[in-house]
Amino acid sequence: MAQSVWGYDKENGPEHWHQNYPMAKGDKQSPIEINSKDVRHDTSLSPWHASYDPGAAKTILNNGRTCRVVFDDTFDRSVLRGGPLTGAYRLRQLHLHWGSADDHGSEHVIDGVKYAAELHLVHWNPKHGNFAGALKQPDGVAVVGVFLKVGKTPKPEMKRILEEIDNIKTKGKEAPFQHFDPSILFPKSRDYWTYHGSFTTPPCEECITWILLREPIEVSPDQMARLRSLSKNGENEPMCPLVDNWRPLQPVKGRIVRASFK
Ligand SMILES: [Zn+2]
């Protein structure tokens, strides 16, 4: 497997990642399954707060593996605080993982339930100087995970991202994406699970405080179809649907998942 070509296919998928990225076989890998019976309710966990500046949104892009929105993180402009975190973490990007059908696509699994998609909002701890520095620290990154479920009352707020998708159909495409406050995507409930884990994409650095929101947001079958209309190939190549860009479950290895709720 060449360095630059990890992916989700048979020949370059998650079972191969460790060949170039040994961390992928580490002891604190993500995603994991959350089993309610093993979760510890922690009364010391405080609520989390996001204060996002809509002006920090910059671009949306298709990198052949996901659809990503990038934010200006050169100063404390859009930050996440509270919950299990100490200090403010800066929002850098958000992206999604999804399936080829509605019954799978999320990375984390809740009591055996897979959702259609999972949204990740990636934040880093500025006390480590820059994003690259934060990746090397156990408290370097905080990711808020939001589950997407297909339902009858789809969240209109997803529209903005999905209508932009026509402009980034193929790998390498990028479009301006301005004035967007990603906190409109959060569900009503702020209840969360938290545990220490890793990025779910190579190099799978173990620097992440996960904050997984209990309440999923709803999307329509239409909206899911739009995500699946992205191509993992470039403009002059045959259309190849970008789907099933999720990593399978990883061993928990004694880690404790805490919940902010009972
Ligand atoms: Zn992700």
Image (cartoon, grey):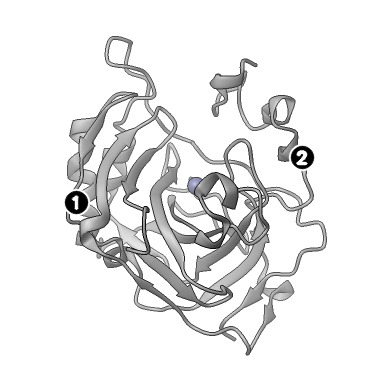
Label 1 – label 2 distance at C-alpha: 37 Å
Residue extending farthest front: 129
Residue extending farthest right: 254
Please give the name of the residue rendered at 69% of the width and 74% of the height, measured from the top-left corner.
Answer: 39
Residue 207 lies, in percent from the top left, at: 64, 54
Residue 99 lies, in percent from the top left, at: 45, 40
Residue ID for mark 1: 160
Can see residue 104? no
> What residue type is disc 2 on?
Lys
Q: 106 above or below 166?
A: below
* Label of residue 25 in the image: 2
Q: 18 above or below 25?
A: above
Q: Which element carries disc 1, helix, strand or loop?
A: helix
Work out whether mark 1 precedes mark 2 in sequence or the reverse, and give the earlier one: 2
Please give the name of the residue rendered at 33% of the width and 10% of the height, measured from the top-left corner.
Answer: 237
Can see residue 95? yes
